[in-house]
Image (spheres, rainbow, N blue to C red):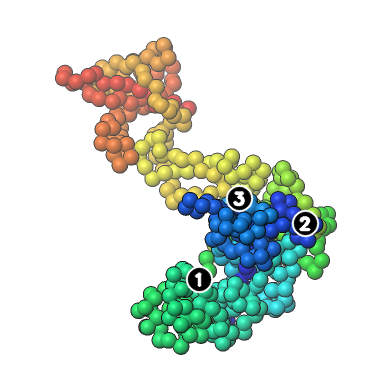
C-alpha cells in the first residue's frame, strides 16, 4: 500500500490562538485593526507573525516594527509567545490523534499526519480532509490542507500550492509549477536560484541532479526529489504508535455520560479479544476522549503484570474515574473514544497450582493495581533486588507498576538464619566495642548507653567497597552477626585493624535481625 500523508498548515496560528483567548478582538468586529506579533531580533523589534488583515495591507514577517508603523499608524503590536504557540500546536496534534496515531509537528505552524490505511474509516481521503478542516474551522482556525504521497509533497502543496488531494504518483505533474520557495531552504539559496533563472521547481527538475548538487549542495537535490514524489521520508510522530488500538467514532457528538461506561466496556472487551488472539497482555491502557470542541482528555491505567482481563480492567477504570479531581466533562459531546495499548508483553494462559498460591498471587497483584490506579504509580512502591554485593544497594524501591529487573533475590541456605537483617540503619550508628583478640568478633559493645554482652558471634564477612561508585578511598568492612545474652541479634561491622602504628578500629551497628 502506497504511503499517504495529510499536511495541515495554519498560516495565522499565533493570532488565531490569541483571538480564541480574547486577546485579539474577533474577526469582523467594528473598527477592526491589524495585529502583529513582534520579537527582539538583533537590535530591533521585528514582525514574526501577522494576522490576515495585516497581511492584506502588505506587512510581512521579518519587517521591523518601526517600518510597519510608518506604513500603518494604527497597527496593534503584541509580544510573540512562541512557547504558548507550540503548546497550542501540540494540543491540535492531540486532537488529530482521532484520525491516525501517527501525528508529527511540522513547524512552523503545521502538522503532518500519516493517514496510510486510515482514510477509509472517514469516507475516503476527501472525507478525512473535509472532516479535519471543519473541525479546525469550528475552533476559529484558518487552515490549508493537502494530501500527497510524501510528506514534503503534501507540505509544499499546502504552503505554496493550491492544496487538495494529489493522486498517487502524480506529485511531479502537480507540483512542478510551484516556486523554488517551496523547497523550504534559506533565502540566500532562493535568491541565487532566481538569479540563475531557476524560479520554479519545473526549471530545477529539468536539470541533472548532479549539477544541482555540485552547485547548491546535495540537500537541495534531496528536497526536490522528495517534493516531486521520487523519494519518501517517514515522519517521527509525537506519540509512539501503540501496539493495539480500538476506537469508536460517533456520527453525532456523544454527550450521555450515563452510557459512557457502556462504550468503554465494549472497547475493553474488543481490546482483550485482540490481545488474546496475539497471546499478549497489556501493561498500559490509555483511554482518549475526544470532544467536539477540540479538547482531548486521556486516562491511563497501568498494571503490574501483563493483563487482558476485561473485568479487572473495568474495575481499574472505575477506580481511576472515581479519583479524578476534574471529572470527565463531555461539553458539547464526544466525537470519538479511543483505547490504546502502548505496551504489550507475551502472556500465556495461567496454570493454577493445587496449593492455591497462584490465586493468592493474583489477588495481591489485583490489589497493587487498584492502589496504583487510586494513588498514582509513584506512591505505591515495592522493593526489587539489585545486582550488587553492597548491603545498602542490595534493594531498590521501584514503582509497583514498573517491570521488575532481571536480578533475583538470593535464596537463603536451608535451616540457616538470614544473612542480612530486616532493618538497616542509614547511616550506620557508631558503637563502642571490645574484642577479645585483635581482628576478632566483639565480646561486648555499648549502643545507646546500654551495654550488650555477646553470647554468640559469627564472622567476619569482609565486604569490599564498589570502587567505581564509592571511590578508591572507601575502606573495607568486616561484618559480624552477633547475639547478646538476652537473645537479641545485631549486625555489626568494623573499619580498620588493630595495628600499633595506626588509629584504633571503629565499630558500627548497621542493622537489627528480627
Q: Which residue is mark 2?
A: 31
Q: Report the side of 338 relative to 217 (left or right).
A: right
Q: Is residue 506 above or below residue 183?
A: above
Q: Which picture quadrant has residue 368?
A: top right
Q: Earlier in the sequence, mark 1 or mark 3?
A: 3
User: How many C-alpha atoms fall within 10 Å of the one at disc 2: few (<14), some, or many (≥20)?
Assistant: few
Residue at image coords 16%, 19%? 501
- Rounded to the nearest angstrom, the CA distance separating label 3 from label 2 is 22 Å
Looking at the picture, how far across and down is residue 475, in whole percent? 27, 30
Looking at the picture, how far across and down is residue 83, in whole percent? 57, 52
Q: Which residue is mark 3?
A: 79
Give the number of the disc on residue 184: 1
Mark 3: secondary structure: strand
Residue at image coords 73%, 51%? 22
Q: Which part of the image, by quadrant, shows the N terminus?
A: bottom right
Q: Earlier in the sequence, mark 3 or mark 2?
A: 2
Question: Which mark lies nearer to you, 1 or 3?
Answer: 3
Give the number of the disc on residue 494: none
- Judged from this view, the residue extending furthest toward the front is 70
Residue at image coords 72%, 76%? 127
Looking at the picture, how far across and down is residue 396, in whole percent? 46, 40
Mark 2: secondary structure: loop
Question: Which mark lies nearer to you, 2 or 1?
Answer: 2
Question: Can I make out residue 271 in this image?
Answer: no
User: How many C-alpha atoms fall within 10 Å of the one at disc 1: few (<14), some, or many (≥20)?
Assistant: some
Question: Can I make out residue 22 in this image?
Answer: yes
Q: Is residue 164 above or below residue 96?
A: below
Q: Nearer the viewer, residue 440 or 377?
A: 377
Q: Earlier in the sequence, mark 2 or mark 1?
A: 2
- Rounded to the nearest angstrom, the CA distance separating label 1 from label 3 is 26 Å
Amino acid at each position: 500500500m502506497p504511503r499517504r500523508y495529510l499536511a495541515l498548515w495554519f498560516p495565522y496560528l499565533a493570532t488565531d490562538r490569541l483571538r480564541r483567548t480574547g486577546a485579539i478582538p474577533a474577526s469582523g468586529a467594528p473598527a477592526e485593526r491589524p495585529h502583529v506579533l513582534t520579537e527582539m531580533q538583533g537590535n530591533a523589534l521585528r514582525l514574526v507573525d501577522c494576522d490576515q488583515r495585516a497581511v492584506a495591507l502588505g506587512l510581512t514577517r521579518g519587517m521591523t516594527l518601526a517600518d510597519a508603523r510608518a506604513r500603518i499608524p494604527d497597527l496593534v503590536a503584541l509580544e510573540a509567545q512562541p512557547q504558548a504557540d507550540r503548546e497550542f500546536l501540540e494540543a491540535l496534534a492531540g486532537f488529530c490523534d482521532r484520525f491516525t496515531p501517527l501525528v508529527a509537528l511540522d513547524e512552523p505552524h503545521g502538522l503532518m499526519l500519516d493517514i496510510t490505511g486510515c482514510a477509509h474509516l472517514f469516507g475516503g481521503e476527501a472525507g478525512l480532509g473535509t472532516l479535519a478542516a471543519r473541525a479546525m474551522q469550528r475552533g476559529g482556525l484558518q487552515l490549508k490542507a493537502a494530501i500527497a504521497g510524501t510528506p514534503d509533497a503534501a507540505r509544499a502543496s499546502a504552503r505554496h500550492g493550491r492544496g487538495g488531494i494529489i493522486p498517487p504518483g502524480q506529485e511531479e505533474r502537480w507540483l512542478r509549477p510551484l516556486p523554488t520557495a517551496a523547497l523550504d531552504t534559506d533565502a540566500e539559496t532562493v535568491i541565487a536560484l532566481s538569479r540563475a533563472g531557476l524560479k520554479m521547481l519545473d526549471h530545477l527538475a529539468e536539470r541533472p541532479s548532479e549539477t544541482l548538487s555540485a552547485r547548491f549542495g546535495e540537500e537541495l537535490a534531496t528536497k526536490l526529489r522528495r517534493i516531486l514524489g521520487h523519494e519518501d521520508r517517514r515522519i517521527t510522530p509525537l506519540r509512539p504508535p501503540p501496539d493495539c488500538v480500538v476506537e469508536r467514532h460517533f456520527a453525532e457528538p456523544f454527550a450521555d455520560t450515563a452510557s459512557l461506561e457502556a462504550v468503554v466496556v465494549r472497547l475493553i472487551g474488543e481490546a482483550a479479544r485482540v490481545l488474546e488472539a496475539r497471546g499478549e497482555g497489556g501493561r498500559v491502557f490509555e483511554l482518549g476522549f475526544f470532544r467536539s470542541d477540540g479538547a482531548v482528555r486521556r486516562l491511563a491505567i497501568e498494571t503490574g503484570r501483563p493483563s487482558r482481563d476485561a473485568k479487572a480492567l473495568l474495575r481499574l477504570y472505575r477506580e481511576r474515574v472515581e479519583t479524578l479531581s476534574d471529572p470527565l466533562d463531555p461539553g458539547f459531546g464526544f466525537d470519538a473514544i479511543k483505547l490504546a495499548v502502548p505496551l504489550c508483553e507475551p502472556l500465556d494462559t495461567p496454570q493454577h497450582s493445587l496449593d492455591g498460591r497462584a490465586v493468592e498471587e493474583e489477588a495481591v497483584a489485583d490489589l497493587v493495581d487498584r492502589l496504583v490506579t487510586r494513588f498514582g504509580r509513584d506512591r505505591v512502591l515495592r522493593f526489587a533486588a539489585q545486582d550488587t554485593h553492597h548491603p545498602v544497594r542490595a534493594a531498590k524501591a521501584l514503582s509497583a507498576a514498573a517491570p521488575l529487573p532481571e536480578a533475583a533475590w538470593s535464596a537463603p541456605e536451608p535451616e540457616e538464619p538470614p544473612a542480612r537483617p530486616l532493618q538497616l540503619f542509614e547511616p550506620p550508628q557508631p558503637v563502642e566495642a571490645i574484642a577479645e583478640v585483635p581482628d576478632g568478633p566483639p565480646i561486648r559493645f555499648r549502643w545507646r548507653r546500654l551495654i550488650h554482652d555477646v553470647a554468640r558471634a559469627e564472622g567476619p564477612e569482609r565486604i569490599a567497597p564498589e570502587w567505581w561508585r564509592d571511590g578508591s578511598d572507601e575502606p573495607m568492612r568486616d561484618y559480624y552477626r552477633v547475639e547478646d545474652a538476652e537473645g537479641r541479634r545485631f549486625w555489626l561491622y568494623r573499619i580498620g585493624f588493630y595495628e600499633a602504628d595506626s588509629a584504633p578500629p571503629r565499630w558500627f551497628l548497621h542493622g537489627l535481625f528480627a
